[in-house]
Image: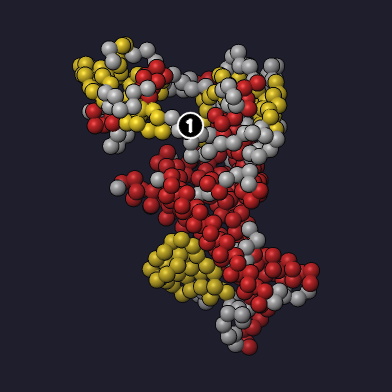
């Protein structure tokens, strides 16, 4: 229940901030263009709070925090007194209307820059992207790893941590090839000796984001700190919990054999679905004997394996692997702008790949996934929550730019047609477009919600 409430609260805060930024973009530019704004609402439905401003705008905080709107004076919607016609949206030039509509998505991009600016000012604790092996049968198997190698660039784009590596790789899904630039981990700072480019054939590269990362799907073995024989987490309602296993227990033996490595322990559990396994653990200095029966589950290949539901404790990252992405007051702005641009480019590419079929509709996420992401990032701390807000803000801006008549992009499409034809798109055509756009948007939302529930 606590996780649900935390995710919900984080979701409401995140969505409220992003919607406010988006609608304020419309509001600000509309006022600058001389349009009268009748209502500025965050949320839909019954008003929880309202206030009439001195500027004649009613400010509203509504009960359903799933959107917002800026109601402008418009002769197409309501009757407008002759004395106020010059303040109506529809009376403004086509370029003014384009500016007002585009201001919402632009505000989302600007908000992302601000969020990332403060994120880089605070500093982001990160880990250098180092690999120590490759996986047979994958696109990267041709890379021969003899010592730990750090990923320096992906197809010419410099990367510094795993988050940047994942972002760069995702943008190449569906491409025929990509290039990885690797360097020995032990190199001196600024030393380019040993840098080597690897060209990978990625025509058959596919991955399911619910089951693996693009890194492992490509066939790169991530270098990690050692795994300790200590249980860090026990899954709720898992076989381990039923057997009495607790966080902090140290694994001593399994089925009478001394513990040697976490990998061997996992293999023994996976090979025993439905069979009772004897564990000897040390708890507060005393050894205890526990009997656990791994539950039979299907793996990614459909094979039946045993699972007990535990996560081990990892050794701390060595200092040589740690980096801090932190900038000064001036440099943080440049880093934030560059990062926002990367997010915009990748997001546009992903939308294109979604329609081309290179990316499955299974990858669409809805409000449940967003709420979980908001809760998780908020749990890790402010710096991660700011990064999450920037990512969702960019995606919100891009979604609104899609040429669907019910979105900002649809209105912009109509206005661009008006620019070239020098006359508005007929109301009948707009009405048909709105219906089509609403149906398509509803279908996409339904798919996203279905994916959310399937992940749950």
Position of residue 40 in the picture relative to residue 345 (left or right): left
Taking the view exactly as shown, the residue that stands out farthest to the bottom is 82
Residue at the (35%, 29%) spot, across then down: 307
Query: From the viewer's perspective, is residue 73 above or below residue 325?
Result: below
In this view, the residue in front, 82 or 225, is: 225
The residue to which callout 1 is attached is 301
Residue sitting at 70 percent across and 77 percent down? 426
Q: Is residue 350 above or below residue 231?
A: below
Quadrant of residue 289 within the rendered picture: top left
Please determine whether, in this image, residue 14 is positioned above or below residue 51: above
Q: Position of residue 237 (x, y in %)?
A: 28, 37
* Image x and y of residue 181, in percent: 67, 25
- In the rendered view, would you say 261 is above or below 8? above
- Is the C terminus in the top left, top right, bottom left or bottom right quadrant? top left
Q: Secondary structure at mark 1?
A: loop
Q: Residue 363: percent from the left, percent from the top?
A: 53, 45
Display colour scheme: secondary structure
Looking at the image, which residue is at 75% across and 76% down?
Answer: 423
Task: Describe residue 24's horizontal placement relative to residue 204 as left or right.
Answer: left
Q: Nearer the viewer, residue 328 or 364?
A: 364
The residue shown at (60%, 69%) is 434
Q: Is residue 185 visible?
A: no
């Amino acid at each position: 229940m606590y996780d649900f409430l935390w995710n919900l609260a984080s979701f409401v805060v995140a969505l409220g901030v992003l919607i406010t930024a988006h609608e304020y973009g419309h509001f600000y530019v509309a006022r600058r263009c001389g349009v009268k704004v009748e209502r500025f609402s965050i949320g839909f439905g019954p008003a929880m709070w309202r206030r009439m401003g001195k500027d004649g705008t009613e400010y509203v905080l509504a009960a359903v925090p799933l959107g917002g709107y800026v109601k402008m004076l418009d002769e197409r919607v309501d009757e407008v007194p002759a004395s106020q016609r010059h303040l109506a949206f529809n009376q403004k030039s086509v370029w003014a209307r384009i500016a007002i509509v585009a201001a919402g998505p632009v505000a989302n991009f600007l908000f992302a820059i601000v969020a990332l600016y403060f994120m880089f000012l605070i500093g982001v604790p990160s880990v250098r992207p180092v690999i120590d092996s490759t996986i047979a049968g994958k696109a990267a198997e041709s890379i021969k790893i003899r010592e730990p190698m750090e990923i320096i660039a992906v197809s010419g784009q410099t990367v510094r941590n795993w988050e940047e590596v994942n972002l760069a790789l995702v943008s190449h899904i569906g491409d025929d090839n990509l290039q990885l630039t690797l360097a020995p981990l032990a190199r001196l700072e600024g030393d380019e000796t040993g840098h080597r480019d690897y060209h990978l054939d990625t025509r058959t590269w596919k991955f399911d984001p619910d089951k693996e990362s693009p890194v492992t799907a490509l066939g790169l073995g991530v270098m990690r700190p050692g795994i300790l024989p200590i249980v860090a987490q026990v899954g709720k309602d898992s076989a381990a919990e039923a057997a009495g296993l607790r966080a902090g227990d140290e694994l001593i033996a399994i089925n009478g054999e001394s513990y040697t490595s976490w990998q061997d322990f996992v293999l023994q559990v996976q090979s025993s679905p439905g069979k009772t396994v004897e564990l000897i653990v040390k708890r507060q200095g005393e050894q205890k004997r526990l009997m656990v029966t791994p539950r039979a589950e299907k793996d990614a290949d459909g094979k039946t394996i045993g699972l007990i539901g535990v996560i081990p404790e990892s050794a701390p990252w060595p200092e040589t692997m740690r980096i801090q992405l932190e900038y000064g007051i001036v440099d943080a702005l440049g880093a934030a702008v560059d990062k926002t641009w990367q997010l915009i480019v990748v997001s546009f590419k992903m939308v294109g790949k979604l329609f081309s079929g290179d990316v499955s509709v299974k990858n669409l996420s809805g409000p449940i996934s967003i709420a979980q992401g908001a809760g998780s990032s908020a749990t890790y701390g402010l710096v991660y929550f700011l990064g999450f807000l920037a990512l969702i803000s960019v995606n919100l801006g891009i979604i609104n730019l899609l040429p669907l008549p019910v979105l900002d992009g649809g209105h912009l499409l109509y206005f661009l047609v008006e620019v070239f034809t020098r006359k508005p798109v007929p109301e009948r055509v707009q009405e048909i477009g709105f219906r089509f756009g609403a149906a398509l948007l509803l279908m996409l939302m339904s798919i996203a919600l279905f994916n959310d529930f399937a992940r749950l």
